[in-house]
Image: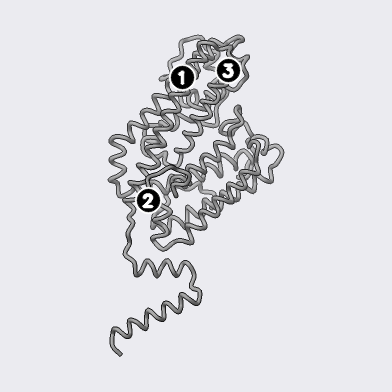
Amino acid sequence: MSFSLRRKGLWAFLLIGLGMGCSQRTLDLLGRSFVPMHLTAQQVTDSTYHQVILPGYRTFSQRTQALQQAVDALAQAPADKTRLAQAQQAWKAASEAWVLTEAYQFGPATEERLRQNIAFWPRRVEHITRVLGETTPIQIQQLGTSRKGLPVMEYLLFHGPEAFTGAGAERRVAYLTALSQDLVTQAQALQTAWEGDYGKSYLSSANAQNMQLNQWVVLLENIKNKRLGEPAGLLGGQATGAETLEAPDSQSSLTLLKAALDGFSQNYALEGLKIQANAPDTAEYVVALGHREVHQQILAQTQVVRQGLAALEPSLEQALRENPEAVAQSYEAIKTLLRLVKVDLANALNQTVNFTDNDGD
């Protein structure tokens, strides 16, 4: 039998096998074997940088400027309830924009401690009240991370309009104004770093995909442990309760938790973004590598997590008190998603996870 006939026979055998119901995994592997790889990790890194990371930090910077403007307006008329409401809304918008960037808060965010300066939590009420009780001028550069950032601003903004009209109102306004100005500075530093030298370094780094994967693990660990496990007492210790949540005064902890999950989805699959046509993402790359099943499991489990979080409405603070079973279910759902990313996705990408919370997951 000629080589040509033998080759036709092989293809006929493969086609018959496919027609008899090969799994999608087999189809992917066959496709990987016979079709040249058209997508590279570098292309995904470039796309993520331009479609997600830069726009995310730019949006956050813009939101901090809008927050500063709202705080300045409030400072001119502290008794104006409309201006207070506008400042509160601006805080929520800036906080959500910040949490959306958590999926890529490596590099300058950690190396220059910008993340700690922007959003150290749980907030330390005693540290905040100590600053409010002092009489010396507020020097924001001399304050530690627990005395500034978005969580401190939340405490100041969401204690009712009387907080800006009674005793100590002038000090509260001065503190809030200094915080808003510092937040703009921190956000601009992040944006500048990513637009400049650090961005260039990231794009040329052979380790970019590994940094990204490990940050996803950090993000999901934070959701599992810090946002759900510790407050609900699901880590083997005593429940820390609503006071240790991300935004208990504004009742925004659940909104920010959802934003953190959305940040992962945007970063992994460009989900929900207005993007350049055909911009590649990690999800597409995973499928191209022959791991469609892993990709589908991640998408499906992300949806399971979203459904679980919907059951915690109207707020995580209330769910901790009245619906602890639903909180526990959300914890288990995010735990499963974390395992998929930490093990299955890492293996699919041939990357090593360096971060672990040492809880046995």
Which residue position is annotated with label 1? 69
Toward the right, the furthest residue is 322
Q: Nearer the viewer, residue 113 or 321?
A: 321
Toward the front, the furthest residue is 277
Q: Earlier in the sequence, mark 2 or mark 3?
A: 3
* Eye-nearest disc, 2 or 3: 2
* Eye-nearest disc, 1 or 2: 2
Which numbered marker is on residue 82?
3
Q: Is residue 261 above or below residue 87?
A: below
Q: Position of residue 82 (x, y in %)?
A: 58, 17
Query: Residue at image x 68%, y 35%?
Result: 318
Q: Position of 254 compared to 271: left or right? A: right
User: In the image, what residue type sits under mark 2?
Assistant: Asn
User: In the image, what residue type sits under mark 1?
Assistant: Gln
Q: Earlier in the sequence, mark 1 or mark 2?
A: 1
Q: Position of 251 compared to 13: left or right? A: right
- Gap in angstroms between the C-alphas marked 2 and 3: 44 Å
Q: Position of residue 74 (x, y in %)?
A: 52, 15
Q: Position of residue 300 (x, y in %)?
A: 55, 55
Q: Residues within 10 Å of mark 2 (few under 14, many from 20)?
A: few
Which numbered marker is on residue 278?
2
Toward the bottom, the furthest residue is 1
Mark 1 and mark 2 residues within 8 Å of each other at the beta carbon: no
Q: Earlier in the sequence, mark 3 or mark 1?
A: 1
Q: Nearer the viewer, residue 300 or 114?
A: 300
